[in-house]
């Protein structure tokens, strides 16, 4: 059963903020930001629902993206899936390794290195807290755009 995911993106000039999660949390967080000095005025709070239109399986999603064979691209796609389809608040290297297992793609021996590369590219953000004793990550709006707009071709 798929939950409805709420996402609000506000952009004014060079400033952009995106809030995503369940309806109550998104509305509360956006209201909190709007009342603070963090967001330039004016801002209207009017959330829209965005039902998940992702495929049923991760393997099918990877295939729909052109089946990239570069581990950095795969890790970003996996992070996107974990946040947007599995509705995780954050993920760690163990979650990424499970994605490799789920898709039956041979895993890289250095998944943490690829997580760090995605941070350097602006696709992931490392959180201060940990998840299950491992560094926790979230996908950034740049990471979302990368997955949503990119179509990879496999190397022959």
Image (cartoon, rainbow, N blue to C red):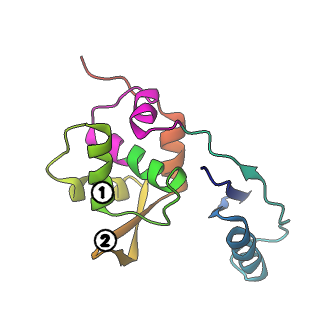
Q: Is residue 69 above or below residue 133?
A: above
Q: Describe the element under mark 2 as helix, strand or loop.
A: strand
Q: Is residue 45 above or below residue 85?
A: below
Q: Which residues are magenta?
A: 55-75
- Pick the residue in front: 14 or 59: 59
Q: Describe the element under mark 1 as helix, strand or loop.
A: helix
User: Residue 57 at what x, y percent from top left?
Assistant: 45, 38
Give the image quarter of residue 106. top left
x 25%, y 37%: residue:
105
- Pick the residue in front: 130 or 102: 102
The residue that label 2 is drawn on is 135
- Pick the residue in front: 60 or 8: 60
Q: Is residue 12 something one can see in this rendering? A: no
Q: Which mark is residue 37?
A: none
- In the rendered image, which quarter contains the C terminus? top left
Give the image quarter of residue 24. bottom right
Magenta-colored stretch includes residue 77: no
**In the drawing, does residue 49 fall left or right of residue 92?**
right
Give the residue furthest to the left.
Answer: 109
x 47%, y 49%: residue:
80
**In the drawing, does residue 54 fall left or right of residue 94?**
right
Q: Nearer the viewer, mark 1 or mark 2?
A: 2
Q: Are marks 1 and 2 in contact (CB under 8 Å)?
A: yes
Q: Earlier in the sequence, mark 1 or mark 2?
A: 1
x 41%, y 52%: residue:
79
Q: Is residue 38 above or below residue 94?
A: below
Q: Residues within 10 Å of mark 2 (few under 14, many from 20)?
A: some
Q: Which mark is residue 115?
A: 1
Q: Is residue 147 something one can see in this rendering? A: yes
User: Residue 155 at what x, y percent from top left?
Assistant: 26, 22
Magenta-colored stretch includes residue 57: yes
């Amino acid at each position: 059963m798929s939950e409805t995911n709420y996402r609000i993106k506000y952009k004014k000039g060079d400033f952009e903020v995106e809030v995503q999660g369940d309806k109550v949390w998104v509305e509360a967080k956006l209201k909190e930001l709007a009342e603070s000095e963090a967001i330039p005025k004016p801002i209207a709070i009017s959330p829209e629902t965005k039902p998940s239109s992702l495929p049923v399986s991760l393997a099918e999603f990877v295939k729909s993206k052109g089946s990239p064979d570069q581990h950095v691209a795969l890790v970003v796609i996996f992070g996107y899936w974990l946040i947007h389809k599995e509705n995780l608040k954050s993920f760690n290297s163990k979650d990424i390794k499970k994605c490799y297992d789920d898709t039956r793609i041979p895993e890289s021996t250095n998944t943490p290195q690829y997580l760090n590369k995605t941070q350097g590219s602006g696709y992931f953000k490392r959180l201060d807290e940990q998840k299950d004793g491992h560094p926790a990550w979230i996908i950034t709006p740049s990471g979302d755009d990368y997955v949503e707009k990119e179509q990879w071709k496999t190397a022959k």
